[in-house]
Amino acid sequence: MEHVQDLRSRLLVAVLAIVVATVIGLFFSQDVISFLSQPYCTMKENLEGREQEICQFNLSSPISEFTLMLKVALYMGLVASAPIWMYQLWAFIAPGLHRHERKYAYAFAAIATPLFAGGAFLAYFVVSRGMQFFMNINPNFNITIDLEKYINFYLGVMIVFGLGFEFPLIMLMLNVVGLVTAKRMLSWWRIVVFVSFLFTAIMTPTPDPFGMTALAICMIILYLGAVGIASINDKRRGRKEESLADDESSDIEEATGVQVASSLDEDDSEGEEGTVRRGRFGRRRNFDSDAT
């Protein structure tokens, strides 16, 4: 019952953190939409050769802008409150982990958010280059874009790459808890390289090899960095196990069972000698009394 109450309280804290961050993000959602719209507006200005006072988009319904603002605010709230709800998640799982595993779990929650943000911003610049490529295919056409589809496309790519940047961290956590070794992780490098390029080729919205290669190389570098940290962790774990084995063997060598046994034998022999002497003395004493 206490387990269920703890889960309920931590879910409540996580939901409240997301709601508060979403409400705060609602005040900045217009700025985020303008930031995401800037690549399209800049490309259109360059194509038309004049500066536009207003960058125009299409909206499918009167409430589309408001629903888009709510969606952007929700994404902002999830990312901004990630340290809180991830901490609540790990705090709920932590009682079932060892002490050192809880320590690494908190580090995971702290590192996950910057990694996600790094992947999202890198995807933003890659999508911007893709926008420039597609806008330059045929500059004679007047292109008008639906704002909701445009923002959804941007946010989708940013979230996917943000999650992709979490993969090396997940593998590192598996190494910390002892489920996979650095040697095994390094043996997968060919698969990681292939999957990284395949993933970026599918997700990047441009055939430009620069954007695809940049994202793939970043993911590979992160994975190799995780392998390096895992190797250090494996060596430290090995030294710790060796020291524990040495301590156990030294304790066995210091055992004095034979000496204790010999001392007991000496005590027994002394006891027997004392008995013999007393027996002899007793017989001599009886002999003297009989003589008298």
Image (tube, grey):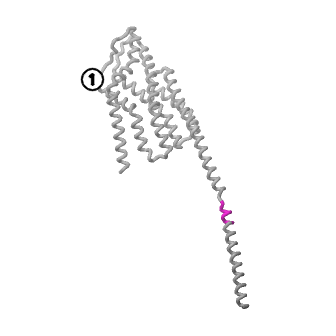
For image coordinates 39% across by 18% down, the residue present is 38
Above or below 205: residue 180: below
Span highlighted in magenta in the image: 256-262
For image coordinates 61% across by 43% down, the residue present is 239
Query: Was residue 95 drawn as part of the magenta stretch in this picture?
Result: no
Comparing 121 with 133, the one in front is: 121
- Assess disc 1: are there few (<14), some (14-19) or many (≥20) residues with their C-alpha within 10 Å of its C-alpha: few
Comparing 167 with 11, the one in front is: 11
| Residue 290 picture location, percent across and down | 71, 90
Q: Main secondary structure of the magenta part?
A: helix
Comparing 55 with 98, the one in front is: 98
Residue most extreme to the top: 49
Above or below 102: residue 81: above
Q: Is residue 99 left or right of residue 254?
A: left
The residue singled out by tag 1 in the image is: 61
Q: Secondary structure at mark 1?
A: loop
Above or below 233: residue 198: above
| Residue 241 picture location, percent across and down | 60, 47
For image coordinates 59% across by 41% down, the residue present is 236
Q: Is residue 245 left or right of residue 75?
A: right
The amino acid type of the residue labelled 1 equals Ser
Q: Picture quarter containing residue 81?
A: top left
Comparing 67 with 251, the one in front is: 251
Q: Is residue 112 left or right of residue 259?
A: left
Q: Quadrant of the C terminus?
A: bottom right
| Residue 130 picture location, percent across and down | 44, 20
